[in-house]
Amino acid sequence: MADSDSPLLIKRYASRRLYNTETSDYVTLEDIAGFIRDGREVQIIDLKSGDDLTRQYLLQIIAEHESRGENVLPLNVLTDLVRSYTSSAGSMVPQFLAASFEMLQNGQSKMLENMEKVNPMMANMPGIEAMQAQQAAFLKAMTTGFGSNWSGPSPEGETAPSEGGDDLEQIKKQLAELQTKLSKLS
């Protein structure tokens, strides 16, 4: 049986077919999206060159969902992302996005906790655990590979300090203050 803590290794053959090394069968992008939704980390490697293609395929999955009308990313966010690739602010975008998604996840988790306190039956509601697993997988996918300045959330839920200068620290402080305000509103 496979260790679900280690990434699921998918090999891409020269024919562009994707091969699941755990189950010894071919998979589709939708299968890979399902693994990720189930909370599994995935790594896609080109068999011939050994290049890591994970980011490329994750972006392709997102693009396919967006093109089918499953719009999660507003047009202005997509436009700003394109602009960030050509601007000096681009170096801060990954850290900002990661911190924003962490704040979103924490806010959703607190909302679920509060709902469970109000109605203990909510904890047994179908889909709650799947939703929490999706949140964790989404955050992990969004924070993976954002460079050496982002060290991600610690097990205690705090963000580790980074070498991004005073601006990054100020943004983190502002996000923490917003988190506190959100917590008080709940």
Image (spheres, grey):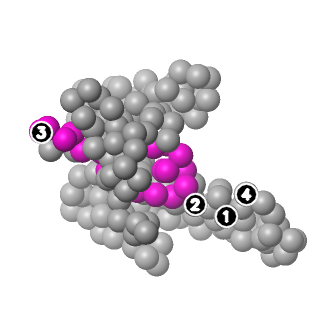
Disc with the residue nearer the chain's start (4 vs 3): 3
Amino acid type, mark 3: Ser
Return the disc, 2 or 3, that comes first in the chain's sequence: 3
Which residue is the site of mark 1? 129
Q: Earlier in the sequence, mark 1 or mark 3?
A: 3
Question: Of circles 1 and 3, which is in front?
Answer: 3
Location of the C terminus by quadrant is bottom right
Q: CA distance from mark 1 to mark 3?
A: 38 Å
Front position among marks 2 and 3: 3
Residue beneath disc 3:
49
- Name which quarter of the figure residue 151 lies in: bottom left
Q: Is residue 42 visible?
A: no
Residue 94: give x, y in percent of width and height. Answer: 34, 46
Residue wearing tag 2: 133
For residue 144, side relative to residue 63 (left or right): left
Depth check, front residue: 126 or 9: 9
The magenta segment is: 32-49
Q: Residues at badges 1 and 4 in contact (C-beta under 8 Å)?
A: yes
State whether residue 105 is above or below residue 153: above
Secondary element at tag 4: loop
Horizontal side of residue 176 vs 55, given as left or right? right
Relative to 72, does residue 99 appear above or below in the rendering? below
